[in-house]
Amino acid sequence: MAKLNGNDEDIQYICKLIYEAYRVPVLRLDETAAPRLALAPAALNRPSVQGTGGLPVEVVELVRGRSGAAGRNAEEDGTLSAEADGTAAAAAPALPHLHTTGFLESFIILLLPGTGGAIVIGPALNAPVTGDNAASLLRDHNIPPGQQASWLEYYGSLPVISLTRWYHEALLLYTLVTGQAMSVTELLLAAGTLAEPLHPADDSPDLDLSYRREHTWLHHDPMQEREMFRHITNGDKAGLLRTHASFAEESYGRLSRKSQLRSKKNLAVSSITLATRAAIEGGLFWEAAYTLSDFHIQHIEELRDIPAVDSAMLAALCDFADQVEGSRSARHSRISDRCRNYIYNHLYEELPLGRLAEYAGMSASYLSQLFKKETGTAISDYIQQQRVEEAKRLIQLPGITLSDIATRLHFNDQSYFTKVFKKYTGLTPRQFKQHSR
């Protein structure tokens, strides 16, 4: 691809191409960070932080050339030289800079040669920020409750784009401006997204290793750890407890320099992460395993003393073993297991046989025969059973009506829901609800 001339007309054309392709806000800023062109300018409608609204300060500083990160990347690449007044100008644009603010807004910033300034893509979100997540994020930044509504409205106006598409957007922008190609690896290495490993001279891994060996405060044998998580894979809580009891307190690593409580919480999080993988290997549906992991980690983060964290971590590991044991059934082929997992994850959607067959990569008739042969249940019956099981869980939750449950789980009407529910439980939904109180 030939490099464009780089004049304002070309740059504005590139901005419009990027906007049309991704529908993400695009700004053309001059060397003072003032907008010359604003396409869907969500960033300019950003709520104020400490009296300052509009673009985040760090983005403005990058464009004006006062942020060393963008300049250093470009100077090392030989594409940018800083002028005496500190503005960024050169014969060729710098490499794309990927920047995410503390408020989780993502930006792509490409400094331009000649007249200076930059193309700024964003703000965008790489995952939705809504509800409780937004509230906790705003509390982290000490945003007063009276301002949170405007921030929620602002977040709701931002496009959500996956990291993969975000990286591709940065690569496309760079190619359109320079006529040169760049890989994702080159982008991430050059754009300041990877932090250098930090090993302070007075607290290096080598020093800690020497100290632990001198005092024989060794970490646990990895085979011991493997044995413990094997018990979770097998759904064997008794074996898990026996192995856990054999761990010595001093065999655990130190996972925080400043806080023993934080160290224990970090240890619990890493243990639950390993337990999640072990449970999935043991047959627990991966969405159920990840959700269980989130639940236990959130609980542990709220605790305020070490004994409570120790107890909660062991309870979490036992919970995973129990969940695996409760979900164990005869081993099926990989195809049947994949279909069962898919049904679990998409239970709140229509699940025609053709959709499952497409997911499994085989004909509908063959999948139907294989599933029935291995599970003893037709796919349609299995889906009904799983929806009834889900309905039983929902019925016991507050604030959900029986008609809501029937609609959410795709039963045609209330009477059909009642008929199917009674078929598998012997009770009507209303009777089941009364017995559950």
Image (cartoon, rainbow, N blue to C red):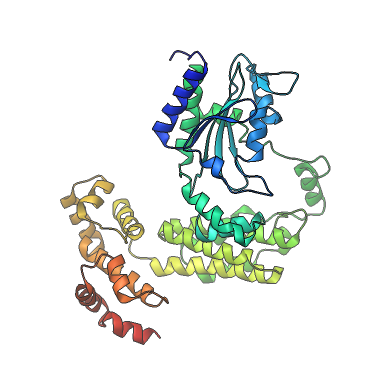
Query: Residue 203's spot in the image, x, y percent?
Result: 80, 45
Left or right of 245? Residue 421 is: left
Residue at 68 percent of width and 30 percent of height: 69
Q: Give the quadrant of the N terminus.
A: top left
Asked if 317 appears above or below 422 in the picture, the reply is above
Front-lying residue, 37 or 334: 37
Q: Position of residue 147 (x, y in %)?
A: 60, 57
Is residue 22 visible from the viewing direction of this image? yes
Q: What residue lies at 38% left-to-right and 84% top-to-bottom?
A: 436
176 up-or-down from 274: above or below: above
Q: Residue at x 20, y 51 (%)?
A: 354
On-image quarter of the C terminus = bottom left
Task: Determine the image quadrant of residue 90.
Answer: top right
* Residue 270 visible to an observer of this rendering: no
Of 140 and 261, which appears nearest the observer?
Answer: 140
The image position of residue 150, as x and y in percent, is 55, 54
Q: In the figure, residue 95 lies in which quadrant?
A: top right
**Closer to the camera in the image, 127 or 338:** 127
Residue found 30% across the figure and 83% down from its top: 430
Q: Residue furthest left?
A: 365
x, y percentage for residue 162? Answer: 46, 42
Instruction: Specify the quadrant of the image occupied by residue 268.
Output: bottom right
